[in-house]
Amino acid sequence: MKDKILSTLTQEETLEKILDMDRLEDHEWVWINRDIFLNICYNIGLDVEMTETEIEDALRQTEDYEIIEILTEAFRKREYIPIDQFQFSRLETGYKPTTDIETAIFVKENYYRKLFIRLSKAFDWMLKAMALDTYFRMGLDYKSLKEVYEDLYEGNIRILEDVFRKGEHTYLAGTWKHERKTDELYFYKSGEFFCSWAEGAVNSKFEEHIHRE
């Protein structure tokens, strides 16, 4: 029965039918989680072939990610981008992330670009943390922290996209891993943990060293 849900969902051509909406493009962003999986099953007509009890039993056997992966592919085809809900909550006023259930957020591509411009400002502290680690621990031939920051990190949206899509960014022997729930950045060099960063500490230390140079 689980396979019936997944195969029917994969074959369904329109997100409008899956989500019971008139036009997907009228929505800048859409959220998906287990709370609406039963509705989705009814929207794609599974109630014709299965009873409600059978659908509910099948959904209990289905992992959240199995349905979300199928929907992610469908959203990508319609030029919607998946974004982590904890980061989305920092950018979209009024959205509160769900802590007891996995929620996927899909954002219209042009709105996504606007969000990342804001994101680059809101999370500039991550780029400063990377600059600090690169300058003090990577042994590169830079004369100042400011030079490292301006050359490698300042306004680098690509790095932030890397962090928010994969949860980490790697440069040479260094890897920074982002803990989304606590909003901390962990630095590893050659696989060995060195330090963790939070926004306030980063900004303070960064400014302190910049003023010394």
Image (spheres, grey):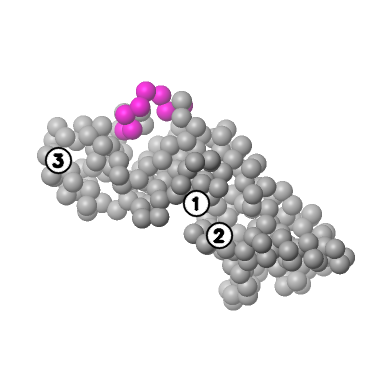
The disc, 3 or 2, on the residue closer to the chain's N-terminal end is 3
Packing grade of label 1 (10 A; few <14, some 14-19, many >=20) is many
Q: In terms of image quadrants, where is residue 186? A: bottom right
- Residue 28 part of the magenta segment: no
Mark pair 1, 3: CA separation:
33 Å
Question: Could you say where residue 133 lies in the image, as x and y percent from the top left?
Answer: 70, 68
Q: Provide the secondary structure element on which disc 1 rests.
A: helix
Find the magenta span and give its range.
Answer: 18-25
The disc, 2 or 1, on the residue closer to the chain's N-terminal end is 1
Question: Could you say where residue 85 lies in the image, as x and y percent from the top left?
Answer: 47, 48
Q: Residue at x 63, y 73 (%)?
A: 195
Q: Provide the secondary structure element on which disc 3 rests.
A: helix
Mark 2 in CB contact with mark 1 (< 8 angstroms): yes
Question: Could you say where residue 67 lies in the image, as x and y percent from the top left?
Answer: 32, 46
Packing grade of label 2 (10 A; few <14, some 14-19, many >=20) is some
The disc, 1 or 3, on the residue closer to the chain's N-terminal end is 3
Q: In terms of image quadrants, where is residue 178? A: bottom right
Q: Provide the secondary structure element on which disc 2 rests.
A: loop
Q: Is residue 172 visible?
A: no
Q: Quadrant of the C terminus?
A: bottom right
Residue on which disc 1 sits: 86
**Kind of residue at disc 2:** Asp
Residue on which disc 2 sits: 183
Mark pair 2, 1: CA separation:
9 Å
**Kind of residue at disc 3:** Glu
Mark pair 3, 2: CA separation:
40 Å
Residue on which disc 3 sits: 52
Q: Is residue 212 visible?
A: yes
Q: Residue at x 82, y 59 (%)?
A: 147
**Kind of residue at disc 1:** Phe
